[in-house]
Amino acid sequence: MSKDEIQRQVDSVRARRSELENHIIDEYRAGYIGRREFIRRGTVVGMSLPLVGFLASACGSGDKEPSGGGAPVSTEDIQKGGTLRTGLQTPGSDLNPVVVNNQGALAILGQSGEYLIFSDRELKAVPRLAESWKPNADASKWTFKIRQGVKYQDGKPMTAEDVAATFNFQADPDTGGNALSAFTGVLSKGGAQATDESTVVFELEAPNGNFPFNTSSDNYNLIILPKGFDNKSWPKNFQGTGPWKLDKYTPDVGVNYTRNPDYWDKTRQPLPDRNEIKFYEKEEAAILGVQGDEVDVLAQFSPVNGKPLLTDPNVTVIELRASQHRQLHMRTDKEPFTDKRVRQAVALLINRDNIVKGLLEEKSDYGNDSPFAPVYPSTDKSVAQRKQDVEKAKALLSEAGQSNLDLELRTWQVFEVPQYAQLVQNDLKAAGINVKLNITDAASYYGDAVFGQSPWLDSTFGITEYGHRGVPNVFLGAPLKSDGTWNSAHFKNKDYDKLVTEYVSAIDLQSQRTAAKKIQEMLLDEVPIIFAYFYFYLTATKPTVAGVDVSAMGHVDVSQAGQKA
Amino acid sequence: MLSIVIFLAAQVLPGDVGRRVLGPFADQASVDAMNEQLGTDRSLVVQYWDWISGVFTGDLGESIRNREVSDVLIDPLVASGKLALLAFIIVVPLAIAGGVYAAMHEGSARDRIISVGGLSATAIPEFVWAVIFILIFALGLGIFPTTAQFPAGASVFTQLEYLLLPSLCLVCVLFGYIARMARAGTIEALGADYTRTAVLKGLPQRTVIMRHVLRNSLLPTIAVVATQAGYLLGGLVIIEVIFNYNGIGLTLARAATAKDIPVLQSGVLIIGIVYLVATLIADILYSILNPRVRLGAAE
């Protein structure tokens, strides 16, 4: 096709697209955003993947950026049939879609259930039960076109009414659902309306440029279920529209699935005949499971416990850059952290190289003391990276009139957190800060998780673990806003709150980046929380297996996987 | 009394039940709603009465994970029972035979190997044995699975294949203890007047050992074995965790972490009852095998 013809097609496409979509295309053409970011932003505002792919080729330089890891394999290279065995963390909660809150359980929801959108490994919004979506001018109202001809596993059709009912149910405070934390200030009960058989309109509480991610697999409780469905009965039938159908569920042991013969997506019919999931209570046992050939796939492992897998020639590791991280909070309303120079000094004392290269085997990005992980397209990478500077830290402490400080660092036994706490303890010695570690179990650390009854929220100095999110909105809000329910640093700054509102309501990437830069610079200066690293999401597979798809949120899709042909 | 102690001990666990179900990042309104649904916002007296009155009618209540407590506990109890039984079948005859053999060769190199080797094996914790066996037999030689959780519907032989390594860990830990008791009892019985009389009567050695020595020497061993039954059923947390085996120990550890009090208190109560029953059986066996106990009671 000639250049003129391509340009005519591009013009024709652009004439039918909204102002917002054209704005993103312009950003891409002008080089403000790369190909991957263009595809991601394009899908977020509702452009289809084929369209955004065409525009990426037609309007861009053709440069290909590296993917997030684990190169896709053609399904022709994969043997069909057989059984694929996956190891998952034992679900820590009842398999009720309303209360699910850990990786093992959410990965189970995603086998037989489906979301409107799948937030994939590159943080693209891939249409699933939603065919397309569009915002109004200020992104306070989003219109979703719901896929037709989709059936639940019991044969009943999935409707727009079901979609609206699912969202209104999960957004209802009386339901007591886990998704409420993502919907607070975004969507309230009744905010989702089915306006016809194939359309659902979401009226938001405030403009939100990233709202599609609230409807996606990132908001993992939100599998679409029939209107009036009793969520408590879900573990009996694993109802959903997904590619896998329940065969046998043994609580705390595992789940066996067979292919769903009525699965709607003809291009993604499951390749294996059976999908067997085995639960592991401890990560160590799961690692032995994949090394001992008990499972073909281990959905997630940590760089600290999983070091044997990183060097095992009989294991292939898929690594995804992610936003999962640890927050080292310093209470801004309690001595000695009321003076920001002390907080800055602590941040300057931490040797991030030791953490990233030593503790995490380089399976991590560096953090720069804000929730803007390098993986986010909206992160402004021009903000200078904070590095260890002991002399500057000592000078700041001296200016603040602080010396020979004694601190207690509270946290709990999870993944690499105790080792991280030890590194912090060691680094702070360089400036004469004596840190006493208080490492407990989860229940003791989180307590009742409300102010006044929780070491997490009440301690002066503490470390808390946060999982991946496709967009930073949650990290920017609850742990840092003045009224944030997870604000363990007790950081109260009206200017910051305004910047977050500005960021959340921004639709185009340039506006988001502009707001992000201001937030990054403010948090780098104020340092209520140290974000030292954002570690990768790691998955292990046997080298003979291909086609496994994972997301950093914890979803694992083996429908297009199998033994290599 | 046991039920009250168990109930109160379960309440000491830190954290809010609704919070444990929904996770630390859940909205407080959701947590309150969950506590109301679960009934954990009621007074302790009401909760205890609800539970204990249910226990007497066979209703153990509902887990915070939306399942009947009896359903949660039954499979793990059967699973732990299988593991304990296999370990028992291996260790009891092996340790008794080892102890008797050592006693019959008292002071010899064979005696020292069995005694010192057995005690050394007992001194090593079961999780160390687990790591050693997994490294050698599962990862190194590849002849056993790395975990014990056999697939659903597995045949008896497949189940044995999965359960053998964890059982061997328990065998290592229990062998020295039981063998030592058997050895001590046998040495005492071998030096007893009735044994000397039996030998002087010209009875064959086999008859002397089986009829006169073993019957007397194994009395303390039986008491030891019986007390280990309770441990084997309820105390295998570490082995079950390492081998990823969904037994009662792992289930109770999980319940304690999740603050699933209905499961925890009922499970501990059941294990307490198992201990009591095992001790009772040991006493009955003791009295059957030892006429002096029966006669003493009759007097």
Image (spheres, coloured by chain):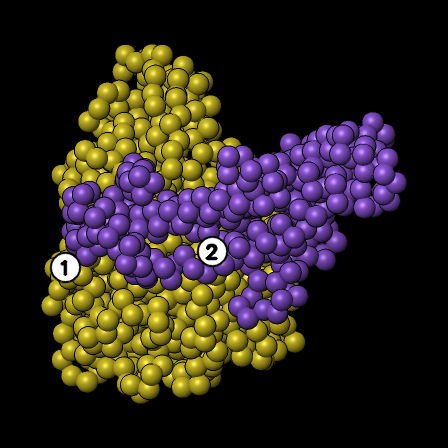
The residue lying at 14 percent from left, 59 percent from top is A174
Q: Secondary structure at mark 2?
A: helix
Q: Secondary structure at mark 1?
A: helix
Residue, disc 2:
B77
Residue occupying image coordinates x 53% and y 42%: B283
Q: Position of residue A463 (x, y in %)?
A: 35, 35
Number of callouts in the render? 2
> Which chain is mark 1 on?
A
Position of A177 compared to A59: left or right? left
Q: Amino acid at mark 1?
A: Asp
Q: Residues within 10 Å of mark 2 (few under 14, many from 20)?
A: many
- Relative placement, left or right, of A481 versus A547 is left
Residue A122, position as x, y percentages in the image:
42, 61
Which chain shows up in purple? B
Could you tell me if residue B191 is visible in this image?
A: yes
Q: Point out the frontmost of discs 2 and 1.
A: 2
Chain ID, yellow in image: A
- Give the distance between the C-alpha atoms of the residues marked 2 and 1, in whole angstroms: 36 Å
Q: Do callouts 2 and 1 point to residues on the same chain?
A: no
Residue A296's label in the rendered image is: none
Q: Which residue is mark 1?
A: A174
In the displayed structure, B249 sits above or below A459; it is below
Q: Tell me the residue at 26%/62% (across/down).
A: A98
